Amino acid sequence: MFEDLPAEIRDGLQGARLRQGSRRRRLSLHQGDMVFSIRRMWNDGFSIALEDVRQLRGLVEIHEGPRHILTCLINAAEIDGDELLCSFKRASKVPDRAALDYVARDNEPVWLLTSG
């Protein structure tokens, strides 16, 4: 679709798309000590800059800003232009609170007040 445009215009459109995406969500991928910016994300995968890494697989964490949101098992699927497209084998949401190890009853007090 954009292949017929001059290179300067394609580069400008690509830069604008990346700037627009970074304003909405700051997604990053963490694997061990390595951190990569996520360019785009969809239901079953994401893309990162090809200049950052050429092959990626295994267990990773996805963060939105400082907040850990997903733990994923991924596989690098293909190279598309200047992006590495990765697909999820498994993606688990990270809960925002600790799991209860008991069944909470309705109207149960949160804590008890003691006299003393």
Image (cartoon, helix red, strand yellow):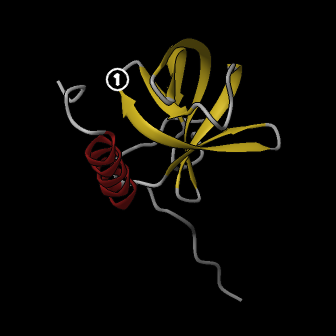
Judged left or right of residue 70, residue 106 is left
- Callout 1: helix, strand or loop? loop
Question: Where's the C terminus, which quadrant?
Answer: bottom right
Can you say whether 44 is above or below 32 in the image? above
x%, y% of residue 85? 49, 21
Residue 39: % across, % down:
45, 41
Image quadrant containing the N terminus: top left
At x 57%, y 36%, the residue is: 102
Query: Residue 19 appears in which quarter of the rendering?
Result: bottom left
Q: Residue furthest bottom?
A: 116
Residue at x 30% of width, y 56% of height: 20
Horizontal arrangement in the rendering, residue 42 relative to residue 68 (left or right): left
> Residue 10 placed where, x, y %?
29, 41
Q: Residue at x 21, y 30 (%)?
A: 2
Which residue is identified by label 1? 43
Image x and y of residue 107, in percent: 35, 54
Describe residue 89's horizontal placement relative to residue 45 as left or right.
Answer: right
**Looking at the rendering, which quadrant does residue 60 occupy?**
top right
